[in-house]
Amino acid sequence: REPAEAPDDDASSISELREAAKGCRRCPLWRDATQTVFGEGPDDAGVVFVGEQPGDQEDLAGKPFVGPAGKVFDAILDDAVVDRQKVYVTNAVKHFKFEPRGKRRIHSKPNAGEVQACRWWLDRELELIKPNLVVALGATAAQSLLGKAVPVTKMRGEVMQREDGLRVFITIHPSFILRIREPADKEAERERFLQDMKAVRRLM
Ligand code: URA
């Protein structure tokens, strides 16, 4: 399953960039993953959402945010009246990293080197799309976009401006909501994320 080498530094459109990313070997994660999960959405989107990395279902489908976290994300975007078809959705890391456990593949967090290696793709996506706003979904995305650790639960709802002028809206990762067991706490966190998505809509 050796991906074909593709030149990756002369892409002049998102579709060329997506094609080049299929053969990415900038870090070792391509070896065990099924495929590169590149960003998806209009290449002139005003808003880009950045997650952490594809999960099991995204790895199989080749599309970002289609699994359990994606379902939560979709439902809340819907409630916030943000049309997912009109925004661009991508990840800080574009290959699924996992530990096999029996027949299951358990998500494992990308390390700083993997995030750094994959930042090459994220930077090019942002250069080509030129969005008005980028939404960092969780700490990994915030770290990749801002080049430093950001306390996301403290900073959520805030916009940070990069030196290049890009505005980055900080919020949590939707899988954080999925992991809360207590129903009242889960509902409260869902509501906070909904408020964040409404704030994003106003900034779009
Ligand atoms: N979690 C992410 O960060 N990205 C996906 O694409 C799916 C789950």
Image (cartoon, rainbow, N blue to C red):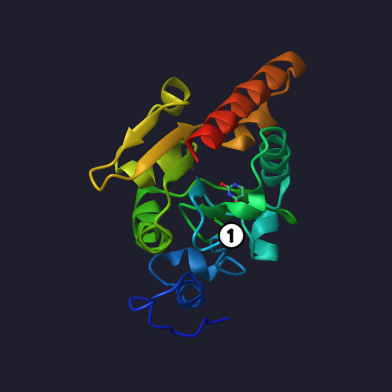
In the displayed structure, does residue 20 sit left or right of residue 182? left
Does residue 189 appear left or right of residue 165 in this picture? right
Task: Say which of 54 and 79 sits in front.
Answer: 79
Hey, which residue is sitting farthest left in the picture?
A: 163
Location of residue 198 (image quadrant): top right
Residue 202: % across, % down: 53, 33
- Apparent side of residue 13 relative to residue 75 in the rendered image (left or right): left
Residue at x-position 29% and y-position 44%: 147
- The answer, for residue 100, to whether it is visible in the render is no
Amino acid carrying label 1: it is: Gly
Which residue in the structure is indicated by mark 1? 41
Q: Is residue 79 above or below residue 14?
A: above
Q: In the image, residue 136 lies at what x, y percent?
A: 46, 40
Q: Is residue 60 visible?
A: yes
Tell me residue 3's x, y (percent): 52, 81
Give the secondary structure at mark 1.
Answer: loop
- Does residue 173 lie above or below 144 as drawn? above
Counting from the top left corner in percent of width and height, residue 167 is at: 36, 40
Q: Between residues 150 and 103, which one lies in front from this camera angle?
A: 150
